Image: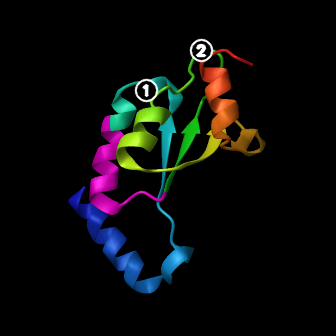
Amino acid sequence: MKELAKIDKIIQTRVAGSAYQKILVLDATTGQNSLAQAEVFHAAVGISSIVLSKCDSTAKGGMVVPICRDLGIPFSYLGLGEKQDDLEPFNPDEYLDSLFGTS
């Protein structure tokens, strides 16, 4: 993590403000370890947003809620398949409906 923080500092000096985003990709099948991963990376470099990959009927990525609530990190995309076209913008209402089976 120290090396990652060093790299982050170097990039910040060379890239202007909002052009530099730090996006963490989390696997929906990881479970509770996702929160720990987000905490560690956020503490080291300050995560801008998260992409949740491998979301499907068996892996719903329930850790979205505590990560957003506890760390204040927004989710930007959900990966619903294996291709780039399978990424879709994160919609909290649709996500919660699918998580609780209301849709």
| Residue holding disc 2 | 58
Counting from the top left corner in percent of width and height, residue 88 is at: 72, 43
**Mark 2: which amino acid?**
Thr
Alpha carbon distance from label 2 to label 1: 12 Å
Amino acid marked by disc 1: Thr
Residue 8 visible within the image:
yes
Q: Earlier in the sequence, mark 2 or mark 1?
A: 1
The residue at the point 27 percent across, 55 percent down is 43
Magenta range: 36-48
| SS at badge 2 | loop
State the image coordinates of residue 15 (x, y, percent, origin top left). Answer: 48, 82
Q: Position of residue 79 (x, y in %)?
A: 65, 37
In the picture, measured across the screen, residue 93 lies left or right of residue 36, that is right
Query: In this image, 51 relative to 72: left or right?
Result: right
Vertical placement of residue 17 versus 71, above or below: below
- Up-down: is 30 above or below 40? above
> Can residue 80 be seen in this snapshot?
no
How many marks the image carries: the answer is 2
Identify the residue shown where x is 33% and y is 51%.
Answer: 41
Question: Which residue has dot 1 on it?
Answer: 30
The secondary element bearing badge 1 is classed as helix
Q: Residue at x 51, y 50 (%)?
A: 74
